[in-house]
Image: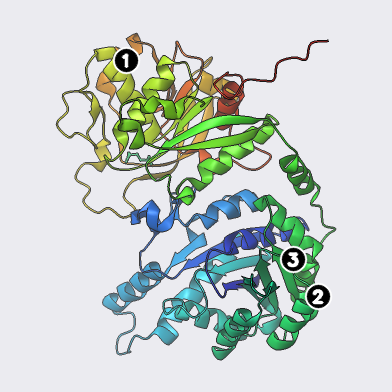
Amino acid sequence: MSKYIFITGGVVSSVGKGITVASIGTILKSRQITVSVQKLDPYLNVDPGTMSPYQHGEVFVTQDGAETDLDLGNYERFIDVNLTAESNVTSGQIYSAVIARERRGDFLGGTIQVVPHVTNEIKERFKRLAQKSQAEAVIIEVGGTVGDIEGQPFLEAIRQMRNDVGRDNVLYIHVTLLPYLTSTQELKTKPTQHSVNELRRIGIQPDVIICRSDYPISEGIRDKISQFCDVDKQAVIPLPTVSTIYEVPLLLEEEGLGQLIVDKLSLKSHQTDLSQWQELVRCLKEPREPVNIALVGKYVELKDAYFSVREALYHAALYHNRDINLIWVHSEDLENDGSEALLRSAQGIIVPGGFGLRGVEGMIKAASYARNNEIPYLGLCLGMHVMVIEFARYALDSTKPNSTEFDPSTPYPVIYLLPEQRGVENKGGTMRLGNYPCQLVDGSQAANAYRDSLVYERHRHRFEFNNQFRNLLEEAGMVYSGLSPDGRLVEVCELANHPWMVSCQFHPEFGSRPGRPHPLFRNFIGVSKEILREGAQPPLPLSS
Ligand code: GLN
């Protein structure tokens, strides 16, 4: 039977609970314990697919096509697993399921209530994941902060689990923040005490408290938290802010959290091997020459909107023993005259995914700049649409080519709605989602990157390349280097007369891992690092 580790958050949100959860997965996996992970999101949306990136950050897509919280991306990268739809549960899904059963008549005669009907449905999801994954440890993160109204049914469900599966099979970990007061120069434990009280009020006594803070945590503070919150001193785990998120598993291991979990849950464990992580962190901390990469998008104010893209860039840079100097370019700013200056120092340009008209002309300008100045370009989904539109405008010598997403009446709809998307009215969960095969063309940049001929990649889109324009653009120099196995859908395209201008209809960023960069990102950085731009010149050789 699986053991359950429940993780709650206290005091404030955004303290890195997701990274902490992912890191706990890493340290358990490093002991050869099999792990699965689940994120519980208290909002009423069925999934984050319909939410603005400004509200929610990136939407992470699993191989089986679920649109999920970006924490799942961290879980995948840290634990090196491919998760499925079962790993993200929202209140929206829970209530929809309960209400659908009520309409079907499953509870005939009964009054449907939060306890037990909603909580039973939640617990069902825990057990379903345990069953499906057969993992020895299932780590479940409750989104939000203890005390939130929407989070109550989830907390009640995790409380009940202690009785359902036995107290030796569940562990409660609470992640809090210790704020620092500049006036008295000390870390304060009171908010942690309050949030533990709040947990206790609903019947949960944490076994472990992980304390996030921007400053070192003294023994005295640990003693105090241990005493006031009634937790063993060695179960008060300090987690100061670190320069790279990949260091968190090492810190938690150093503080003895791995052994503590193994002991408390009587898990069968092997010797810990975190050598790969130690090596990764050592490399990340070494000074490396940066590669200037411009990320041109319309949500750049919120860096989380491009979480996986940014991570994939860092993984690729590390492979080449380089760092990334990420230049965030707001695509709307590129629409102004003279704005090309924003791209002046870019050794590579990346246009990631996105939806809607705003900022698209700026992205097209970035693609044009990359093509004309022979700057490496990587287009991801919308970034491919942008590259195709730009190239069609050049090939046809017209400003009219467009995607019907942005100009429904364009005479040259080079990107248009997928046939299976026509007539689809509902917005939620109706895109072309998840893994699809892609056949690569020998000798192309894409095939050279992958060193493979058939690959599977994750999709999330409604629009695609319009085959009516295939020949025309091919004659002008576009290469269709990746196609669906039936040849019908353009999955990857690139330019023949350019050092490296490659775009894909899918999202390779979701498959990148630390230590195993995605091939397209790897080669994109490999070519970019050789490009000389203003501010990126290597030092002159010293004369003897
Ligand atoms: N808006 C485009 C589409 O729906 C691109 C989507 C994306 O970049 N993920 O096809």
Question: Which residue is under mark 1?
Answer: 473
Asked if residue 97 can be seen in this view, the reply is: yes
Which residue is more in the foreground, 1 or 457? 457
The three-letter code of the residue at mark 2 reads Glu
Identify the residue shown where x is 61% and y is 39%: 314
- Locate the N terminus and report the quarter of the image it occupies: bottom right
Identify the residue shown where x is 43% and y is 86%: 115
Mark 3, ligand 1, within 8 Å: the answer is no
Mark 1, ligand 1, within 8 Å: the answer is no
Q: How many marks?
A: 3
Asked if residue 489 can be seen in this view, the reply is: no
Which residue is more in the foreground, 228 or 336? 336
Q: How far apart are marks 1 and 3 (CA)?
A: 59 Å
Label 1 or label 3, whichever lies nearer to me, is 3
State the mark number for residue 216: 3
Mark 2, ligand 1, within 8 Å: the answer is no
Identify the residue shown where x is 52% and y is 64%: 39
State the mark number for residue 532: none
Q: Residues within 10 Å of mark 2 (few under 14, many from 20)?
A: few
Question: Which residue is under mark 2?
Answer: 219
Which residue is more in the foreground, 241 or 463? 241
- Locate the C terminus and report the quarter of the image it occupies: top right
Q: Would residue 104 appear left or right of 301 to someone viewing this image?
A: left
Image quarter for ligand 1 equals top left
Q: How far apart are marks 1 and 2 (CA)?
A: 67 Å
Q: Name the N-terminal-most of marks 1 and 3.
A: 3
Q: In this view, does 43 lie above or below 330?
A: below
